[in-house]
Image (cartoon, rainbow, N blue to C red):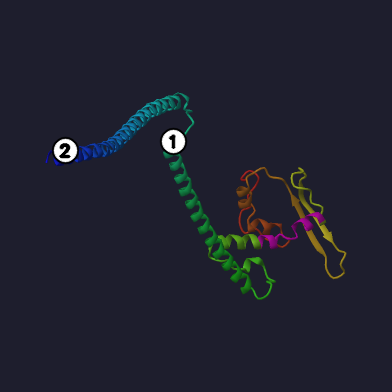
Amino acid sequence: MEDIMKTEGSHDNQRMTTGGPLVDEDEARILHKRRLTREKMQRYRKGIVRKSSTLRHQAVDLQREIERLLARQTTDKSPWLLSWADVARALRDDSDATRNTNGILRQLVLQQDREIRTIRSWVHGCQVLPNSSWRNVSLLEHPHARKHGIDWITQHLYHNTDRVLEQYAFAAVGSGVQIDDDTIIDTSSPDCFQYVWRDQRDMDVPFDVAARALTLDFFHSLLAHGTPLAAIPTDVEV
């Protein structure tokens, strides 16, 4: 019995000694893993602390740089430098002025287009060239078209003025030469004779005053058979 008990006890001791190192290795492995995890977390937390500290220092540096730039902008700011609001306001005013000018030009184009159509219809209405006096030609009612019609008639009426003045040896305008009641009788044609009465003088008066003096009655008085219908203005009255 003692031998059997000793044998069993020896077996128990052997199991205990055999199982002891296995338990120590597992615990050591667990402890090592925990230690690695703890060290990793410590390094992570230290990294966060370092990054946070770096960002705080960068924020301080950037704030100082902003203050420096603002101070420099205040001291170096040109009095002619406009703000964005002033620039935008100026551009808006320029755009409004451009639209206003564009509207005026469009109205002018429409007005001139109406004048052109009116004058064209008037010209097409003249089937033949008039051979009577220009005093019998009617004018349009439209103010601008009427003015163009008067200019057109005047150009035709005085088309040969320069040639006639040169033909009968009138002095140039502004020359100071004065011609009083000079008569030229041309009898070169066997069928008729031509009677030319020259009268020229320079008058230092405004055009409107001279135009009022040269009335139709004044020209009637220049004709050989004409009779003045009204008083002719004299030099003193002009």
Give the main secondary structure, helix, strand or loop, of the magenta stretch: helix
Residue range corresponding to the magenta coloring: 153-166
Residue topped by disc 2: 6
Report the mark closest to the observer, 1 or 2. 2
Q: Nearer the viewer, residue 89 or 12?
A: 12
State the image quarter where residue 50 is shown: top left
Circles 1 and 2 in contact, beta carbons < 8 Å: no
Residue at 66% from the left image edge and 55% from the top image edge? 218
Seen from this angle, which residue lies furthest bottom? Answer: 127
* Residue type for callout 2: Lys
Residue 49 vs 112, above or below: the answer is above
Identify the element where label 1 is drawn. loop
Image quadrant where one finds the N terminus: top left
* Residue type for callout 1: Ser
Identify the element where label 2 is drawn. helix
Residue at 15% from the left image edge and 42% from the top image edge? 4
Q: Position of residue 29 (x, y in %)?
A: 30, 38
Seen from this angle, which residue lies furthest left? Answer: 1
Q: Nearer the viewer, residue 140 or 54?
A: 54
For marks 1 and 2, the one nearer the N-term is: 2
Residue 225 vs 236, above or below: the answer is below
Residue topped by disc 1: 83
Q: CA distance from mark 1 to mark 2?
A: 106 Å
Q: Nearer the viewer, residue 226 or 208?
A: 208
Q: Position of residue 175 (x, y in %)?
A: 77, 43
Residue 87 appears left or right of 203: left
Residue at 75% from the left image edge and 60% from the top image edge? 160
Q: Position of residue 39 (x, y in %)?
A: 32, 32
- 154 inside magenta stretch: yes
